[in-house]
Amino acid sequence: MSKYILKRLLSGLLTLFAISIIVFLIIHIIPGDPIAIMFGKNPNPELINIARKHYGLDKPIINQYFIWIKNLFQGDLGYSIIDGRPVSELILPRITRTFSLTMMGILFSIILALPSGIIASWKHNTWMDLGITSVSLFLVSIPEFWIGIVFMIIFSVWLGILPTSGYVSITESFIGWIKVMILPSLSVATVVAAETTRMVRISMLEVLDLDYITLMKSAGVVNSRLLLVHAFRNAFIPVLTVIGIQIGYLMGGVIIIEKVFAFPGLGQLLIKSISQRDYPIFQACVMVYGVAFVLINIIIDVSYGMINPKIRY
């Protein structure tokens, strides 16, 4: 197991190295000068040259990349070009917010998807199966931001029970934090839950057709035990793979939802850094997404053996 984990960590580092190169090149290729944006209209050329030298933007792009990587390994994310604050100070609070939003979205997704997929597979070719699959297909076809707007109209405008925007820290008010998190979490969870439901249904149908399930049925095993213990345990491995991918997807996918709900997460900061060409912030945000995606996939791969002891690395 330790050998496998080491191998996955090394491959993850190579992936992150490739991501760093792509990210660095993309932000520097995009038209726009952050120094010119910082000084606004009619800037002083001498001040621009001084600022460019201060941030190291006068050096060749290869040198800039290796300086950035060296500082990254030392834990130095640099300083924002626009407001001069440390990048770590800007992104650390937002990482926890975006991660909380992602995890709550996944939690809602699992709560909705697992029972729905199991019921649809058990009631295969019935009106219940048809209803669940139809709703899932409908939700998969709808953009997340549209669902978020619908939720805002229902729960905020019509019912007036949940806020449409903003953020309340969990340390300030737990109830306020829950209220702020519910709508954006449900918005990202709805589409993901629909995809997971379809995956659970397909996996369960494959397992329910196996001989050992037929044998257990003939032996009189209770349906609940047959489904949840014997069938779902084997069907959950491909579902777990999908959930792991969805966590990484949601880390980036919540960017749109954060914009819709004015949620001060990492996605909002990323969008702002792109518009302002704030290189250090953009690079740090994308690398955070990359690290999260790689780590989540490693954790999912390792957890296979815990779910099914027959799996060996």
Image: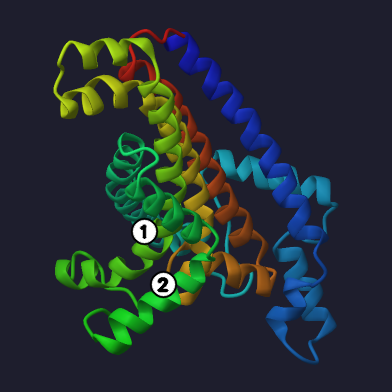
Identified at 17% across, 24% down, the residue is 225
- Is 93 drawn above or below residue 128 in the view shown? below
Image quadrant containing the N terminus: top left
Identified at 18% across, 27% down, the residue is 223
Q: Secondary structure at mark 1?
A: helix
Query: Where does residue 153 sit, x and y in percent of width and height?
Result: 37, 83
The label shown at residue 59 is none
For residue 221, which quarter of the picture? Answer: top left
From the viewer's perspective, tell me whether residue 224 is left or right of residue 141. Answer: left
From the viewer's perspective, tell me whether residue 308 is left or right of residue 161. Answer: right
- Is 44 drawn above or below residue 192 in the view shown? below
Mark 1 belongs to which amino acid?
Leu
Q: Is residue 86 visible?
A: no
Mark 2 belongs to which amino acid?
Phe
Q: Secondary structure at mark 2?
A: loop
Instruction: Name the residue nearer the viewer: 35 or 198.
Output: 198
Identified at 41% across, 29% down, the residue is 205
Please report whichever mark, 2 or 1, sits nearer to the chain's N-terminal start: 1
Residue beneath label 2, please? 263
Query: Where does residue 251 sit, x and y in percent of width and height?
Result: 48, 52
Query: Where does residue 213 sit, x and y in percent of width and height?
Result: 30, 16
Q: Is residue 113 visible?
A: yes
How many residues crowd mark 1 within 10 Å: few (<14), some (14–19), many (20+)? many
How many residues crowd mark 2 within 10 Å: few (<14), some (14–19), many (20+)? many
Instruction: Name the residue nearer the viewer: 214 or 53.
Output: 214
The label shown at residue 101 is 1
Marks 2 & 1, CB-CB < 8 Å contact: yes
- Is 56 drawn above or below residue 71 in the view shown? below
